[in-house]
Image (tube, rainbow, N blue to C red):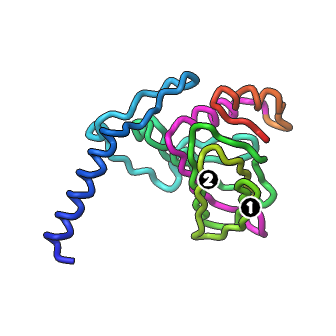
Amino acid sequence: MERHKFLKSIALCIGTISVGLKAFPLNLNNTNRNLNKITDSGTLKPLVIKNDEGKQQIVLGDHQTVKLSGQDTNNQFTLIEQFNSPGMEIPLHVHSDEDEIFHVLEGELEIQIGSEIKNLKAGDLCFCPRGIPHSWKVIGESKAKVLLSIFPSGLELLFAELAQLPSGEPDFSKVAEICKKYNIKFV
């Protein structure tokens, strides 16, 4: 495609998306979170996050590095790198407010979405829409590195709260209580 036609088609797409967003604005109001509404993207600052940078935390055994938070993205999304050993798993749960994308960079991950179970290898990804129960487990012989994208942002606040719990066997009643504040429940 010629450059001029390509640029014209991109401008048309952006205009259509802009009109659509004005007609159907995103609703990020959630009484359990103190999130600002998305504002003009001109207020966002470009960021470069190096491989060894980000907020590191352990959430119920899940080794995470928060690469981008809602504060960085005007509450549009959160990006977390997970790096876990075989056997690490998060049990079946459901989000009421967020969609998630799991992109496997290294290793293998078993994901259950609803009643389906799929094995993902490096390069594979999985979209988990809100409202559908899902779980994941690192399988195989090596650690799995997974890039977790969360739309909209906010779960990083939950993860930060859960990371403050004492290490060792978690008190699941306390975990469930914290998760309830973020409209997440275990099933």
Q: Secondary structure at mark 2?
A: strand
Q: Residue at horizontal 43%, vertical 41%?
A: 76
Q: Residue at horizontal 78%, vertical 47%?
A: 91
Q: Point out the stretch of residues depicted in magenta.
A: 138-166
Q: Quadrant of the N terminus?
A: bottom left
Residue 107 position by quadrant: bottom right
Q: Secondary structure at mark 1?
A: strand
Viewer-proximal residue, 5 or 120? 5
Q: Residue at horizontal 26%, vertical 40%?
A: 42
Residue that lies at the very extreme toward the bottom in this rendered image? 1
What's the residue type where badge 1 is placed? Glu
- Give the answer, above or below, for where 32 lies relative to 20: above
Residue 128 — which label? 2
Q: Position of residue 157 (x, y in %)?
A: 58, 32
Q: Along the polypeptide, which appears first: circle 2 or circle 1?
A: 1
The answer to if 165 sits in the magenta stretch is: yes
The answer to if 17 sits in the magenta stretch is: no
Q: Which residue is mark 1?
A: 116
